[in-house]
Amino acid sequence: MERAREHEGERGDFAEPSAPAGAALELRVHGVGGTTPEEMLGDPRTVRITGDETAAVYRRADDADAERRPGDHRDEPVPEAYVWCNLTSGNAARALWLLLLPFMVANLAHWMRPTAIGRRRTVRLYGVIIRLVGLSLTVLLVAAACEVALDLVAWQCAGTRACAERHTWLGFLSPAVSGHGWWNRPGRRLALASLMPTALTCLLWYLSHRTWSAYESQQPISRDPGPDDDSHRAPLGRPGFWYGRRLVARLRAAHTAAGFLTVTAALGGSAARYDRRHGSVQLEVLGWLLHLVFLAGAAIVLWVVCRRGRSENRLDKDLDRALVRWLPAGALALLVLTMVYAAWSRPGWHSSGRLPGDAAFGALTLTQGVLVIALGVVARVLYRTHPDTRTAMRGQAGPAVALLACALGGVMSGGVAQRVADWLDGTGNTLAGPSALLTWQASTIPPLLLVLLVLAGRLARRTWLLRRAETAAVEAEYPGEPRDTARTLRIAHTRAMAAFTDRAPLVVAVTSAMTLLLGAVALAGAFATGDTPEGAARESPPFVRAAAETCQGLGSWLIGIGFLLFVTWGRRAYKDASARRTIGILWDVGTFWPRAAHPFAPPCYAERAVPDLTWRMATWTSSTGGRLVLSGHSQGSVLAAAAARQLGPSVRRRVALLTYGSPLERLYGRWFPAYFGPAALSSLHREVDCWRNLYRLTDPIGGPIRLPGDCGPQVDHPPLKDPLAYGRTPEHPLPAPILGHGDYQADPAFAEERERLLARLRPGLPAPREANTSSAPGAAPGGRAQGSSGRSSG
């Protein structure tokens, strides 16, 4: 706090700028969902001055050559709009990112670690565990593809006469239909079917490599931290934070190799098991050799994943080219050899029942559970070094989200396997179906939904009580107005629903705890009985048997309906630009962070957007000597804050920050405390020239920054009134809308605060002192505004 006050004393309260005189710039950054440059600049004639179709900076046509006419912009800044929406919601292929949802969720868990002081090894252990969780998700996805292609299609359906006759495209694989065709041997059928999970792995590699070239390879400004640079203490300010090229390339190689090795294990394990019992000595020895090479490859993959994390203190431009090239190639070569081995003639080998290897899903689920529990212990140790009551779930948000990623991956895998099994078998009951564990996992969905329904009822009651409390507050904020009960209730209800965002930690905590408990029950039931819940409960009392049958049947239907909705949504998004825009909004939040835990996650758009903004601000101040206002709405405010941290101290002191509808503290500060916690936001406030933040009580996303001490009122404007007018007035003859998260520019306080920030940037003109903020437009009466008596400087 002492440093903050000294910093304020050095630069004064809206004092005259000491930097060289020059034209001012207002750089505007939009929020989630995106917008057009015409809307951002308020002019139908705009031109792109730098950038491409994906992300670019625009100006009004009249300001295109503003640098050549500095005298024309001494009173007003040059407005620019940075449009980045195509980074997340551009072409139709982005709809396929829905399939990568579990990977994205696991990657989020990496960045949710608590703030830690002096725990470098523990922080590194946290990252290693998360990367292992991400690796297990890749293995799970490819194993599910093997379950569908190798077990259900090639082993069960092609080996069953009724199923093969029903699906004529499988006739050439069936010994009962094709007679003695070359492909009807079990090993050859499995080798052919293994091409499908192999192709899936290749597709994931291609998508990751393509986005890696477009996103991770965007180089930030190269700079050496000076003596007054606190980048080593502010993670977002480290030179290499937004440049994860080397790590993603290493992880991509390891995960690709893991995918190929998973197919190798599913294919070669069945053939080797038969050879150890009935095969020749030569084939048995070959099987053991392939098995040893497989173990060596798995060990190398684990070493690559655990050995190296992110390099943030410098721009790491090196690439482990030999590793990146030869690790996937070696795993693919082993897979090809295993295909040849499995396709070797074994006259006595016939398929029946399920493909051996059900225990693999159980081992994978158990491994994920152990990793999540270990992650929870590490997160607890980190949280105790620097406890903060505002941190979501007392530091357990990362483990909880990692568990949900594993559960989501299991549900998607089980849904695909169950739907394919039902499609192949129809109503004939001729197939054994997918792994029993997948059926147990699907059966846990109804109990989980029941618990969530009870939680929803409790939250609805709390929302109703909050609405009653807000009703009195709304009436107090609009004194002298004729009472309109419906209008008052609508405003109070909007505020109460907006406060629901603050209860998200409770929802995540309950969901993750129940998921862990039900997952343990499913794993124990599958291991103990080796049968489905319905089969395991045949000899149980009628109530238990009925409950097991209901959960299994209802779970199968629910997972099927969910999978169909998932596919339908993805298909609609592929064809419909509006639906694609909705998906883009989800990715705006989920893909802000770099791919530190999973290389197949949707790409991080901030690794393009943050360097873009940093380069633009640095080049402007360097070429003109002027200052700038960085204006960000919603997610744009997060990008603005991250870009400001990447600037050098001398440039950062020329930046005025204006945020509105900002989730910087409400969402990012609570869920990602190590990067947007109180210490990080306070450091940013000290380093920029000034900072003002606007928010509304009706906004479900934006909120106050809540800096401690005197810094809070300096940054946070009192909550803006929403709606601007309760009833009809001469200024608002028609009912004023409840704006919530949008259209902050409609509030007079926005123009006033913007003008105060811009006044600092006008060369040669001292800016006015700030009046008491309790009389500022939009201030809430009755002491409800945070910091209503503080100064408005920053």
Image (spheres, rainbow, N blue to C red):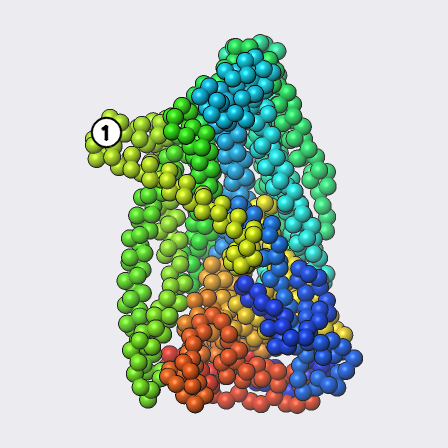
**Left or right: 698 as drawn, with respect to 348:** left
- The residue beneath circle 1 is 540
Q: Residue at x 72, y 51 (%)?
A: 317
Residue 678 x %, y %: 49, 67
Q: Residue at x 40, y 23 (%)?
A: 430
Visible residue check, residue 237: no
In the image shown, does 401 or 747 lie closer to the viewer? 747
Q: Quadrant of residue 393?
A: bottom left
Relative side of 263 to 704, left or right: right
Above or below, 55 relative to 201: below
Number of numbered discs on residues: 1
Determine whether the residue tagged by mark 1 lies in a helix, strand or loop: loop
- Quarter of the rendering occupied by the C terminus: bottom right
Amino acid identity at mark 1 = Ser
Q: Residue at x 36, y 74 (%)?
A: 491
Residue 640, given in percent of the width and then of the height, sits at 59, 68
Q: Which residue is nearer to you in this view: 90 or 15?
A: 90
Whole-percent x and y of residue 92?
60, 52
On the question of residue 173 being in view, the answer is: yes
Q: Decide: is 174 above or below 74.
A: above
* Residue beneath the point at 51% across and 76% down: 744
Please identify the residue farthest to the right as the structure is shown. Answer: 68
**Crowdedness near tag 1: few (<14), some (14–19) or many (≥20) residues, C-alpha within 10 Å:** few
Q: Position of residue 783 (x, y in %)?
A: 37, 81
- Relative height, residue 387 to residue 566 (above, below): below
* 559 is higher (above) or lower (below) than 460: above
Between 334 and 109, the one lying in front of the other is 334
Q: Does residue 794 appear to the left or right of 400 in the view shown?
A: right
